[in-house]
Image (spheres, coloured by chain):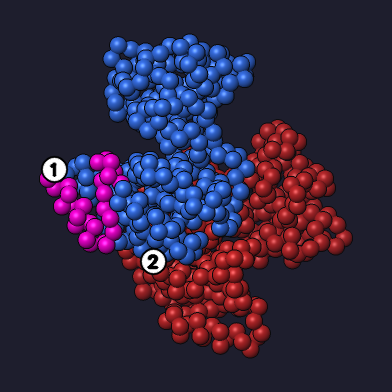
Chain colours: A red, B blue
Amino acid sequence: MSLHIHKPYVLLMGDENDPIYAKTGLGIAQWDADNCVGQVRLGPDTVDAGLPDVTLEQALQTGARTVVLGVVVIGGIIPPATLSVLREALEQGLDVAAGMHQRLADVPELAQAAQLSGARIIDVRVPPENIPVGTGKRRTGKRLITVGTDCALGKKYTALALAREMADQGFDVDFRASGQTGILISGEGIPIDSVVSDFVSGAAELLSPAAASEKHWDVIEGQGSLFHPGYAAVTAGLLTGSQPDAFVVCTDATRSHMAGWPDFPLPSIGEVIELTMLMAKRVNPDVRCVGISANTSGLAREEREPYLDRLSKEWGLPAVDPLDGAVAPLVDALREW
Amino acid sequence: MSLHIHKPYVLLMGDENDPIYAKTGLGIAQWDADNCVGQVRLGPDTVDAGLPDVTLEQALQTGARTVVLGVVVIGGIIPPATLSVLREALEQGLDVAAGMHQRLADVPELAQAAQLSGARIIDVRVPPENIPVGTGKRRTGKRLITVGTDCALGKKYTALALAREMADQGFDVDFRASGQTGILISGEGIPIDSVVSDFVSGAAELLSPAAASEKHWDVIEGQGSLFHPGYAAVTAGLLTGSQPDAFVVCTDATRSHMAGWPDFPLPSIGEVIELTMLMAKRVNPDVRCVGISANTSGLAREEREPYLDRLSKEWGLPAVDPLDGAVAPLVDALREW
């Protein structure tokens, strides 16, 4: 029932010169380069995702299944050069996928090309239809979710880093994407924030279905924050439907207030643990917090380790910066299950 | 930005013989008979809402603005007799409103009739468009919300009873409807459970906008329960956007488990207060619980008063059964603000 995008990908980087606006493409190349045959760059200074430069034809020959738009489109107007590549891809039978607010499927020339060739347009902000109400029924397998003191401080990154580390250590594990970029990276998932509120926890149940084995772990990309004045509903529904066994609290060492909501101080790690436990215990009485993941890039290099040590002592939990690649301490606790 | 239905109403009771399926019409007649010119009943045994029986023509002559479908339509097929009344109403320039899952606007002959006459079709399950993300900004006026140990145990009824009692006592007060039946009763509101999760708290902010006076109270119809495995997202978003000053916990004296979710015991009043306070304090530090509203109709008559007394002693709050009409003790605490 979740979205499914065929790999391998070819990344369309358009003619974007600013890495900020190329985050989707860069993220896919960082986390799943093995499933990318290359990148299509249209300008001389286009951001380089570190993949081989290819033409659409070369991408097709090397087995690409989907062209992923790796750049943000500001204002909803797809640049003409990019649009013609997307249309040509569809005409040649490649699927195209994007995470824009504007739907590719609403662009008449793309919709028509897709209809003629039978290729698919996948707008990853559009949730699947007929999502049921959450049941609260327990499912086979273990689940870890990343929660946060705020939005946009590393919940997706932490989940990806944990899933990779767990796989490296021999865990049977899947990353479960709940947002656009995560879905494009993993090739499947449900954009939880686009689901009608009555069905959010039902969507979370679909996102992380019963596993084949009790030992299997889903590592679920969290969204928003239970304390967020705008997005608490998204977080509450995702948490409830996920029935987590374990959660990791994500924060940012130098953020004092919620990004974009300057009247709202960041909640403490302790407040996040308390509220998450209260809600999650109803759907999984054994839930517990297994660690803290903090983005310390805003601190001077020599301050980072002491900061993480303080966090760890204060909350009695391992505390890591996933950007340093050192999430192994968070995985240790998961062996006990 | 919320839905708005013109009053006075005429209630279309169809040919429904069972009061259970006529709850919408009966609710409107109970709470706002003054704004109903009458009822249209199509069968000899049709449920009686206690209003004058009228024809559409008589309703028009006495000033009706909207025909409200007062009965549930099972299976989504509007009975032909009802359909022809709705079409005739639209043709004569009366708006029609309904809270069905199936949208009236999707019925071709109704859509066409509305287009020809300029009358409106109002499907109250369809939220307004372009709802913004919640801001968390404080707004003038006071707000009370009803929360619950479960769904369907009196949050709407309690809010309506409180708003009526407060008006009787001279408060400047509005009932704010967040669900279909409440919207039909009050003539306006937003169906919170139909809003996309990213925008639920934004919808709640629209539902209860800044008041003209700091003394004004909005009494907001709560939805779901923070502890509900299916609907926690709806509750969390509505609570966050409402920024309540006060809340009343609604429960049912004889319900042991969540209705339809037999694996989930009802949370205690104390758990509901604790979790509601934790979330609501972030958007309104002064929030507090002002009382308990319990449906005691499942208890023997002589057990009701002792039960309410026990609740009151246990939680140190006034406890009432709103079906007895005795919500005044809950209003007393609101004078202090």
Point 48% across, 25% down: residue? B8
Point 82% across, 45% down: residue? A80
Residue A229 in picture, x, y percent from top left:
54, 59
Locate residue A164: give its quadrant: bottom right
Compared with A24, B104 (above or below) is above
Which residue has dot 1 on it? B300
Instruction: Indicate left or right for A313 with A283 as reference.
Output: right
| The furthest residue to the front | B170
Residue A145 in picture, x, y percent from top left:
47, 64
Which residue has dot 2 on it? A277
Residue B326 in picture, x, y percent from top left:
27, 44
Residue A147's label in the rendered image is: none
Q: Can residue A48 be seen in this snapshot?
A: yes
| Proximity of marks 1 and 2: CB atoms separated by less than 8 Å | no
Locate residue A46: give its quadrant: bottom right
Is residue A144 a member of the stretch shown in magenta? no
The amino acid pointed to by label 2 is Met
Other-residue count near label 2 (Cα within 10 Å), few / some / many at <14 / 14–19 / ≥20: many
Point 56% across, 58% down: residue? B138
- Region of the chain picked out in magenta, as a range: B302-327
The secondary element bearing badge 2 is classed as helix
**C-alpha distance separating marks 1 and 2:** 37 Å
